[in-house]
Image (cartoon, helix red, strand yellow):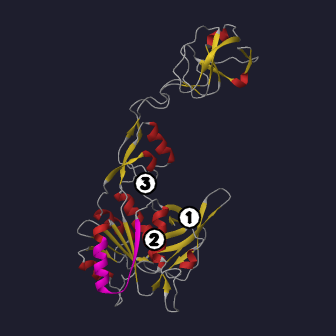
Amino acid sequence: MLTPAEAQERIASHLCCLPVESLPVSQCAGAVLRENICAERDHPPFDRVSMDGIALVAAAVRAGRRRLRIQALQAAGDPALILQSPDCCIEVMTGAVLPDGCDTVVPVEQLRVDGGMAELETGVMPETGQHVHARASDQRQGALLLTAGVRLQAPDVGVAAGAGMARLRVSQQPAFMVISTGNELIEPGEPIEAWQLRRSNAHAITAALRQRGFIRVADDHLPDEAGVLQARIREHLASYEVLILSGGVSMGKLDLVPAALAACGVQQVFHKVAQRPGKPFWFGVAPNGAAVFALPGNPVSTLVCLLRYVIPAIDRAMGAQQIRQGERIALAAPVQFNAPLAGFLPVTVETDESGRPWARVVRHNGSGDYAALAGTTGFIELPPGPNLYEKGFVTQIYRW
């Protein structure tokens, strides 16, 4: 069997880079940028006033002029005025261009204004360039601001808009079809018998995808019938870039998913990973390039495999620089793990007095105990046992 790292590499080597689309900048939050963004102009594009007050010539104050006639008002968005004389000043607003002939700004808090005259408070001696955001002091025209692969957060969208970009080239989101299999599954809210189970995995998968910004997500429920499985999977492969199935991939007589996928022409890349839970995890690629992730049906296994493999794989296919995967964390207490497989264990995160996070394993009754995940932060990955991992052992945490 493959190790988790090997399975991740196999998946990455079989996924194609997703296509590019052009979107209005206002719709790009969370998208992966697929072009470099350069400065349209100098940043700022002019000497910018950074405080309300008056603009004047610093040398005039040093020469003894402390009472100046207010010539005019320079508002933000107006062309630059021209100072008529060092005996004058121009009232300025934050964000306005510094008037021509002026080289400093005195804040309104340091002034007395009366009868069209502005007098500097005692002891105020402005320096040249004071409260002026100098032209190009942030970036020069043509400077690289954002690089392809950035996942666009609020500041990035603002930077792109500030660079004059009305539309951005970003990775097109894949269309997901989430499929749960099993005759025993009943939708929430529907009447249920004692021998049946609620259909929860598909809702958890859909929630995890949408929580991460994916919006093209649909779901389906298929029975344990080979003919129906094949027909519906074939339909979905024609319409969706990513299929995520839950259930039907183990070794039982009604675990019909691998055979149904093979009948639809999906090439198996691997089946089974040396891990607990989630060992029966299956991955393959359809003739049209659609990626198929067939996850074990036990609910903890399903969610673990989704976050450990599927989300990072899609991030890579979208060209993201930063892949949403595990982060380093230390154990809050010793953990005994005996299985000769990689171990995925649910945890909560505690923060000590210095602000350092620690992962504490939560007791649960195996991969079917979905209720134990309530209130947890995510899961950690431990190397194969048997081994006792002491407090402070550093591992990876994958957050729900």
Q: Quadrant of the N terminus?
A: bottom left
Residue lying at 74% horizontally and 14% vertically, measured from the top left: 115
- Viewer-closest of 213 and 137: 213
| Residue 218 located within the stretch drawn in magenta | yes
* Magenta-tinted stretch: 217-236
Q: Is residue 120 above or below residue 280?
A: above
Quadrant hosting residue 231:
bottom left
**Element type at marker 1?**
strand
Look at discs 3 and 1 and give the one toward the viewer.
3
Residue occupying the far right of the picture = 122
Is residue 172 in view? yes
First in residue order: circle 2 vs circle 1: 2
Quadrant hosting residue 70:
top right
Q: Give the residue number, with chain letter if any, for mark 3.
A: 322
Q: Amino acid at mark 1?
A: Ala
In three-dimensional space, the C-alpha distance between marks 2 and 1, rounded to whole angstroms, equals 27 Å
Q: Amino acid at mark 3?
A: Gln
Q: Give the residue number, with chain letter if any, for mark 2.
A: 205
| Residue 367 located within the stretch drawn in magenta | no
Q: Give the residue number, with chain letter if any, for mark 1.
A: 330
- Viewer-closest of 52 and 271: 52
Residue lying at 62% horizontally and 8% vertically, measured from the top left: 86
Q: Amino acid at mark 2?
A: Ile
Task: Judge the density around disc 2: few (<14), some (14-19), many (≥20) Cα neighbours within 10 Å.
Answer: many
Q: Is residue 99 above or below residue 240?
A: above
Task: Judge the density around disc 3: few (<14), some (14-19), many (≥20) Cα neighbours within 10 Å.
Answer: few
Is residue 284 in view? no
